[in-house]
Amino acid sequence: MSEEQTYTEVVTHVRAQDIRLPAGTFVLLTLDNGFDHTKPNSFGDQGLAELAEQLDAAKARAEAGEIVGLGITGKPFIFAVGADLKGVGTITSREEALRVARQGHDTFSKISELSVPTFAFINGASMGGGVEIALYADHRTISSDVPAYATPEVFLGLVPGWGGTYLLPRLIGVEKALQLIVTNPLNNNRMIKGKDAFALGVAEQLFEPVTFLEDSLAYAGDVISGKVTPKAPEVDTDEASWNAAVDAAQTAADQRTGGASPSAYRALELVRQARTATREEAFEAENQALADLIMGDELRAGLYAFDLVQRRAKRPAGAPDKSLARPVTKVGIVGAGLMASQLALLFARQLRVPVILTDLDQERVDKGVGYVHDEIDKLLAKGRVSQDMANGLKALVTGSTSKDGFADADFVIEAVFEEMGVKQKVWAEVEQVVGPECVLATNTSSLSITEMAAGLQHPERVVGFHFFNPVAVMPLLEIIRGERTDDATLATAFATGKSLKKTCILVKNSPSFVVNRLLGRFMGEAGKIADEGTPFETVERAFAGVTPMPPFMLISLVGPAIALHNSETLHAAFPERFYVSPNLAKVVAAKAGGFYGADGKPDEQVLALFDPPAQPVELSEEQVRERALEALADEIRRMLDEGVVAAAQDIDLAMITGAGFPFWNGGVTPLLDRTGIAERVTGERFLTPGVASVPAG
């Protein structure tokens, strides 16, 4: 990794203080790395050594009868988020990996070895090793406002290897534990809230944040004095039910990863063994698993992907100086359909500025504004916004059949029909109303920004601003610079995207930009393979663990008509590479919604529309996968040569955040490098050896 020569541990210190409880002196250890909550506590060599030192001191005091208990908590808003991943990424030998694994077990075990009652007060975000350290305590409390509780190791290519695969099933039961250890990580690293964690049984008490520490200390005092006797967890260790839960989780892993995520299967193996293994046996098995996985490509790819979304996403390559950005105090939206309405809600919630929707008739306008108000009401019902905030948000979003309301807007975005003539007409009308510095942003998914702006008086203020559906969920925002787009417009677009909490990537004006171009090549190749005679089911199965979902399921999600339009656009630009499936065109002509029925199974009536080939060619799953990945490798190299984005890292960031490509592959280019496809197809790797893979030598 790039950090190998510059890594310096940010030490999470352990602050000890004596608290006077009615039963006697209680030691409270606070984990604190000295930064605000934007840099969470983590465990590296020095931090673990300091924790061990404090626990040894507490042990001596406990044996001397000086203390009656010990508790561990975190700095405000943060409990702990696990191992220092930067440090893990610099490990270059299995022996060192094994040492790190054993250091975590040895240090945390000092908690459970104390002769006095021990407590974990989970006051904030708790992930990975932060979840595990609390499992060593006798008792746990958790705050109701904990924003994230998770064991994300499998998501990154590891296992919960500091006790998690043994202690968690024995605390909350194997089925619930597997939800945290395997299912949630493979489901886009799903996090749960403090209340949900309490419902799973990870803590004995749920307290409100304002008085969390006071309430937790009072609870500890009641337990120590015998006033309260917590109920011991009841875990079913019946062999049949335990193994059935593991088998079910393995089936889910198969469907999600196609066996491509070694960490998921190591975790399942460890949990299966936890039913009968001794603590010592289980911990050593975790040590060996961690040592293997730390030296594996899956972790390197996961850390590479993590670095992309945590750091590269915050400093977009090629973005102009942010000081050039102009303020956005009012937003106009052309269109009032579903996409436009989603945009209106997003702008209102994140920017807190007036947003005006326009459309051709009042009925459409009312429907669009109504959608926004209904969504705000749903947020209110879920407790996500207060009544005052809901009222305020509704007041910000208005509608009109006239564009006159755009006169004082600083930013206007269109979300109208994906046809160049329609969009050019819209911008010609808008330009007559808005001021000369108002940014004109298009949500086009494939059309030329340069051509769209060509007939305007101020083409320099037109910029691509391409969201992904659903707008509120998908992080990616492709920002496309036309030939005439100036730096002030581009800087304003990036500043606005950041305020919308989106991952922004600068893209050169080119057909279908990044994600849709690559998905177009991928889905076109898959469609061609099916049209040539490979069974539908074989094509769908071929991509488990490579793409977030099978190609025809993806087409069903985006809509066959949109997929067809994208393929036709790309075919017009690059006819020799992009295939337009006649069978997909037939599905669109039949107005079918997709290839799957409401039951989630392939729709036989839709598949019956496919014309059988005169001379069928049937490929195996492996052949299907190879051919589609070869097509992706070819297209990525062409895009990099064309300068569509600054580097391969931007391709991976886009495919992870815009198309849901899995972390365990590092997106797409590390997979193509690892399998040799990149060199076979293009003559070179996309990334430097050692980036997203085990360092050479």
Image (tube, helix red, strand yellow):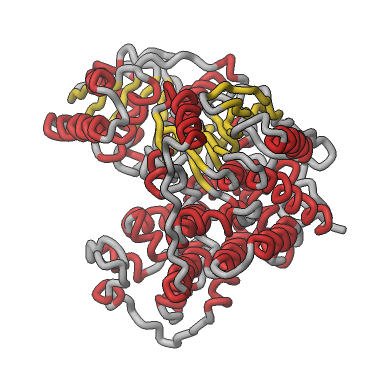
Q: How many marks?
A: 0
Residue closest to the far left: 363
Question: Is any part of residue 570 visible from this angle?
Answer: no
Residue 625's quadrant in the figure? bottom right
The answer to whether 590 appears left or right of 187 in the picture is: left
Image spot of residue 98 (x, y percent): 78, 56
Q: Is residue 138 above or below residue 259?
A: above
Choose between 381 and 595: the one closer to the eye.
Answer: 381
The answer to whether 59 appears left or right of 543 in the picture is: right
Choose between 69 and 559: the one closer to the eye.
Answer: 69
Image spot of residue 236 (x, y percent): 43, 65
Image spot of residue 140 (x, y percent): 50, 40
The residue sitting at 43% across, 44% down in the picture is 230
Image spot of residue 337 (x, y percent): 24, 38
Residue closest to the far bottom: 615
Q: Is residue 683 above or below residue 130?
A: below
Question: Is any part of residue 67 visible from this angle?
Answer: yes
